[in-house]
Image: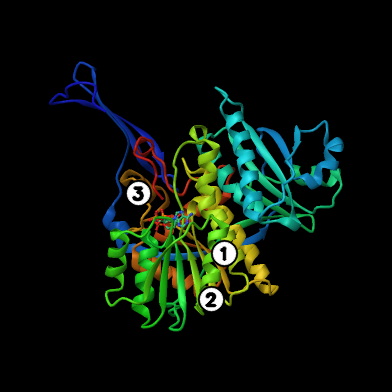
Amino acid sequence: MFYGPTEERMWAAVAVAGRDAAGQAREFDIDLYGEQGRLCASLRGWCSAPMAALEPAAVLDLYRWTWQGRGDAAQSAAATQIWLAPCFAALVPELAGGAPCRVLPAQAAGSAAEAFEDLAAYLFAELRQQLAATAPAPVRWQLVWPLEEAGQAHGLLGLFKTAALEHPCFSAQLIEVPAVLAASQLRAMLAGAGNDSLVRYQDGRPEVLRPVALPPAGPAPQPWMEQGSYALIGGLGGIGRAIAADILAASSQARVVLLGRRPPSPDSAAVLAALDPQGGRLSYVQLDAADAGQVRQWTAGLAAAGERLRGIVHCAGILDDRALLGKQEVDFRRVLQSKVRALVNLDQATAALPLDFLVCCSSLSGAFGNHGQADYAAANAFLDAYMVQRAARVAAGQAHGLSISVQWPLWEEGGMRMAPALVDAMRVRQGLLPLPQRSALEALRQAIALGEPVLMPLYGQRQAMAAWLDAAFSAALPAPAPLAWSRCAARSPALRA
Ligand SMILES: NC(=O)c1ccc[n+]([C@@H]2O[C@H](COP(=O)([O-])OP(=O)(O)OC[C@H]3O[C@@H](n4cnc5c(N)ncnc54)[C@H](OP(=O)(O)O)[C@@H]3O)[C@@H](O)[C@H]2O)c1
């Protein structure tokens, strides 16, 4: 920012404004003063990085998530508020006298998507109320959920982690415990939960979820089969088009249908013509995947036409980036629905179909939270958790095909974009680079070949990415954001991934 004319010779006051995962000073605030001490200009969050040193070393690394036992851990000193799932309501009188304790509302009958949306919206409203105070005191939420119903509530972590990034006075833990236990046992578990954002007690011992790098593998086989078709939900978007092009190029007969809410138009026709110049293998269907009736009608139509649907890639999603305190519930729910409700609708409507796979395009924001994206992060975290549950249902014969959630980082050529300052900050702080399309498509093939329910592909400088992950999971909450938010970036246009 300029405060007045600059002078030919000036003094520069330089202060460190940010450090990278290894503790090296990487961002600086620079104030330029005239010879008489007048402040002429300020540069906030200036950073530089040796591009040449980073880019040649860029690699694609794949991470899976594993539960690991954990010993004693430090505990936050912040005042604690306990939230209990309704099944623990009977323990409230015995827990009285400790931290304030509230019971979450019972879930109305409805789909898993509606239950999650209602729970997330309820806690979103609570958060807004508590964090709106002018100087809120440090607070930690401990939300207790039954182990037997683990999964669905994991989506809340995207909301909590974003709230913690936007409001450092806030932190939250989701603690999964057996549905039947005594108040004294629960008290001990809460006291020993440490600072991890997700802790589960199996056999009385705490376990935490950690990313583990998979050993580098050779190129994965093409997952696209000749006979049958693939549905790309949100397929007219950047990622959908890239996947469609890959399927059409890798096969000679496989058909692809792109689905999205917008009506067919000359623009969509041009996209189809560019991707499928011969015609006949690529089509577009107008469909709002968040509408269960429309999804059922579409799948019924497939069956009636004798179409063999082999795989679905759920790329639908919308953004409404805004700080948590600036969001309205109606918008919060809308962002959730494009991912959460869409996934549950697709899964339910295709439960009887012999799919090879159902793949979700999730995002790093689900695992780490992201400024301005409380809704989007919660939606992606739900996708991840839901695919773990679906994999278990497939194993029990209740659904078919691999269940895969890919936690994408920023694609170089995706439809959702990120401000250049944020891309720079992400490179400096996490060693992450935008994922080139070729590597993204390879990551998708690897994901399908591996069949891991949740896979996190990272692209960039291996050591820096690993150091960032170590730092993110070794210390207290909140974990550093994956998509860095430097002081200069904070003023830039909304984050777009
Ligand atoms: N691009 C990235 O770098 C990146 C990074 C991480 C994760 N992701 C995830 O990957 C997915 C695809 O990203 P993208 O870059 O391709 O985004 P995009 O270009 O914005 O495409 C998203 C598509 O979703 C469709 N859509 C939204 N709501 C829908 C609904 N209810 N039913 C059907 N279609 C719906 C939109 O089309 P209509 O408006 O016509 O419905 C749009 O074409 C997103 O879910 C995103 O969260 C992307």
Tell me which corner region of the image, top left, top right, bottom left or bottom right, holds residue 393: bottom right
Residue at 54% x, 67% y: name it.
Answer: 404
Residue 76 visible in the current orientation: yes
Classify the position of the N terminus by image quarter.
top left
Instruction: Identify the mark nearer the N-term, 1 or 3.
Output: 1
Mark 1 vs mark 2: in front: 2
Amino acid found under the numbered disc labelled 1: Arg
Element on which disc 2 rests: helix
For disc 1, the marked residue is: 296
Amino acid found under the numbered disc labelled 2: Ala
Element on which disc 1 rests: helix
Residue 428 x %, y %: 37, 48
- Relative depth, front residue between 316 and 56: 316
Tell me which corner region of the image, top left, top right, bottom left or bottom right, holds residue 48: top left
Amino acid found under the numbered disc labelled 3: Val
Disc 1 to disc 3, C-alpha distance: 40 Å
**Left/right of residue 158 with respect to residue 287 in the rendered view:** right
Counting every numbered tag in the picture gives 3
Q: Is residue 479 above or below residue 59?
A: above
The outermost residue toward the left is 8
Residue 213 visible in the current orientation: no
For disc 3, the marked residue is: 423
- Relative depth, front residue between 447 and 55: 447
Residue 431 x %, y %: 39, 54
Residue 458 x %, y %: 44, 60
**Left/right of residue 348 with respect to residue 12 in the rendered view:** right
Element on which disc 3 rests: helix
Residue at 38% x, 81% y: name it.
Answer: 251
Disc 3 to disc 2, C-alpha distance: 47 Å
For disc 2, the marked residue is: 304
**Left/right of residue 118 with respect to residue 203 in the rendered view:** left
Q: Are marks 1 and 3 in contact (CB under 8 Å)?
A: no
